[in-house]
Amino acid sequence: SGQTFEVFTLFPEAVAGFLRGGLVGKAVARELVSVHCTDYREFATDRYRTVDDAPYGGSPGMVMKIEPVVAALEHVTRERGPMHRILLTPAGPRFDQRVAERLATVPRIGLLCGRYEGIDDRVREHFVDECLSIGDFVLNGGEVAALAIIEAVARLREGVLGNPESAARDSFSLQDMSSETCPEDHGAWLEHPHFTRPPDFRGLGVPDVLLAGAHAEVARWRREQAWRRTWALRPDLRPQRSLPAGAPVYLVA
Ligand code: ADE
């Protein structure tokens, strides 16, 4: 029933520490999700527990050796069973909400974090199922990327969020946008803005339609806001139509 993440890292305490807190920590406590961390260094065999070496061909930096990485993978596979193996690397396809939705259906996921200049490329070629990047920037290692993926995937699992409808409405989920406001779009959109009490803060008001509270009007306003925000801020998320005149756009900071 629960989903398992196997994280392979040189910093198991840092990863485990982060996962104890917050929503993922609660999901772990409720046994909806489990996370195991495996330290590559435990699978180094020489007396110095070496996990890295100078790159063939010469260049600054170090490369993680293949033996401890593969030994760690094989050990965990023997102990707890096979898993879908993901290598975190800025050279991978981009992780996004579509990928999160796919991974939420996978019962056992292995996340391989690299440090230094990366892992010997034979690991990518022969020992993993896919590569993922969380964005076009370079981290010092895959750990933060693995944590981002665990959080994004785990919150899609049944029972992890308090209110399952909130996941369906999130920015980037495929929302049902079939309405007069937006007929042909079924893309991933940014969310509409949210407001709560007080209705007046130092003269800053809240859109009247939300205070009046007629459900159909609110729904229509939210769709339009989501659409306008997406249009203005994220043209790459491709609302198909042009921006209609009318209500102001509530932009995110
Ligand atoms: N490791 C280093 N940078 C990364 C990134 N942007 N995404 C995934 N893994 C990484």
Image (cartoon, helix red, strand yellow):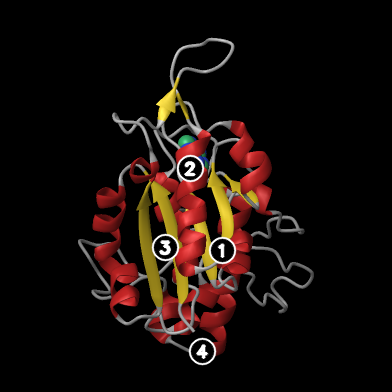
Q: Amino acid at mark 4?
A: His
Residue annotated with mark 3: 151
Relative image position of residue 139 (x, y in whole percent): 42, 35
Left or right: 230, with 252 as reference point? right
Rendered image: mark on residue 215: 4
Crowd class of label 3 (few under 14; some 14 to 19; many from 20; radius 10 Å): some
Which of discs 4 and 3 lies nearer the camera? The answer is 3
Discs 1, 4 touching: Cβ within 8 Å: no
Which of discs 2 and 1 lies nearer the camera? The answer is 2
Task: Name which of mark 4 and mark 3 comes first in the sequence.
Answer: 3
Relative image position of residue 116 (x, y in whole percent): 42, 28
**Marks 2/4: CA distance?**
55 Å
Relative image position of residue 96 (x, y in whole percent): 58, 55
Residue annotated with mark 1: 83
Task: Name which of mark 2 and mark 3 comes first in the sequence.
Answer: 2
Residue annotated with mark 2: 69
**Marks 1/4: CA distance?**
45 Å
Which of discs 1 and 4 lies nearer the camera? The answer is 1
Residue in the foreground of this view, choosing between 212 and 196: 196
Q: Residue furthest left?
A: 202
**Marks 4/3: CA distance?**
32 Å
Q: Secondary structure at mark 2?
A: helix
**Marks 3/1: CA distance?**
18 Å
Task: Name which of mark 3 and mark 1 comes first in the sequence.
Answer: 1
